[in-house]
Image (cartoon, grey):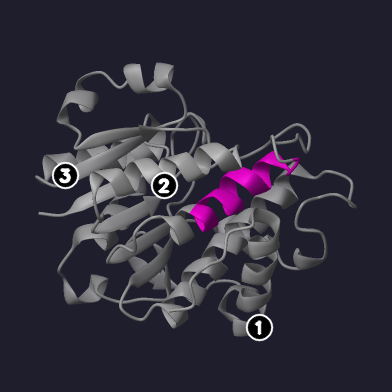
Amino acid sequence: MSTIFITGSTDGLGRAAAQSLLGQGHRVVLHARSADRADALGELKSRAQGIVVGDLKSAAETKAIAEQVNAIGRMDAVIHNAGVYTRPGRGATPEGHAETLAINTLAPYMLTALIQRPGRLVYLSSGLHRGGEGSLDDLDWTKRAWDSAQAYAESKLHVVALAFALARRWPKVLCNAVDPGWVRTKMGGAGAPVDIDTGQRTQTWLAVSKDAAALVTGRYWHHLAQQQPASEATDPRFQDALIGKLGKLTGVELPEV
């Protein structure tokens, strides 16, 4: 059985993934944004291998999350599930970054760099990432008028590019990105066409399965099938430029090998 850390696992797809993996007998480390949200986990809390607490909007708390995970031990897999969809404005984190960028891009980048390297990394993206090209000139939305949909698309492009970059840099780690579809969660809304079990299935399969089909790296998935992502995501030059900018924004360097 594997030990898996899932960010944003108090509700939605993260909680569904945790329940699925626990049901299969795996050990799961949960993440909650706050102590209150951790307390609201109910019976899931008693079944977990551990619970880490911290707000991904804050760089300091994100670093603390990595420390808490490392104190529990090495994970076999990490599912970077947490994210936000639309924000009415750019907002500002304690470090002054746009909130969407901080939660959806900077936090998974920092956690990837700071958590003891697992055997598998899974990043939740979106089909909307294909509309996110051209973001490197103003990653942090300091020059452009705020566009919440565009900011979301760009952040989801970033995590696909990160997964592909890591597949090149860390060949011993299986690194993949997943589009779960438009899922009926609090974020997706009641009218979304994809049920939550279908929405969580691909990422949990990639995190633990011993099927030959799952033992691959540098791929983009939708409902257990590989798809072609946006061209920027697969471009090593874009990947390296993105990682360079994320390193400067966070002060955290991603290990080369």
Instruction: Tell me which residue sits at (40%, 34%) in the image.
Output: 12
* Secondary structure character of the magenta stretch overall: helix
Residue depicted at 71% across the width and 46% down the height: 149
Mark 2 and mark 1 in contact? Answer it, CB < 8 Å.
no
Q: Name the residue under label 2.
A: 66
Q: Residue 203 carries which label?
A: none
Mark 2 residue type: Ala
Vertical relation: 117 (above or below) 38: below
What's the magenta region? 96-110
Residue 180 location (% of width, % of height): 42, 52
Q: Position of residue 61 (x, y in %)?
A: 52, 37
Amino acid tagged 1: Arg
Q: Is mark 3 on a helix, strand or loop?
A: strand
Q: Name the residue under label 3.
A: 27
Within-10-Å neighbours for mark 1: few <14, some 14–19, many 20+: few
Nearer to us: label 3 or label 2 = 2
The x, y position of residue 75, in whole percent, is: 26, 54
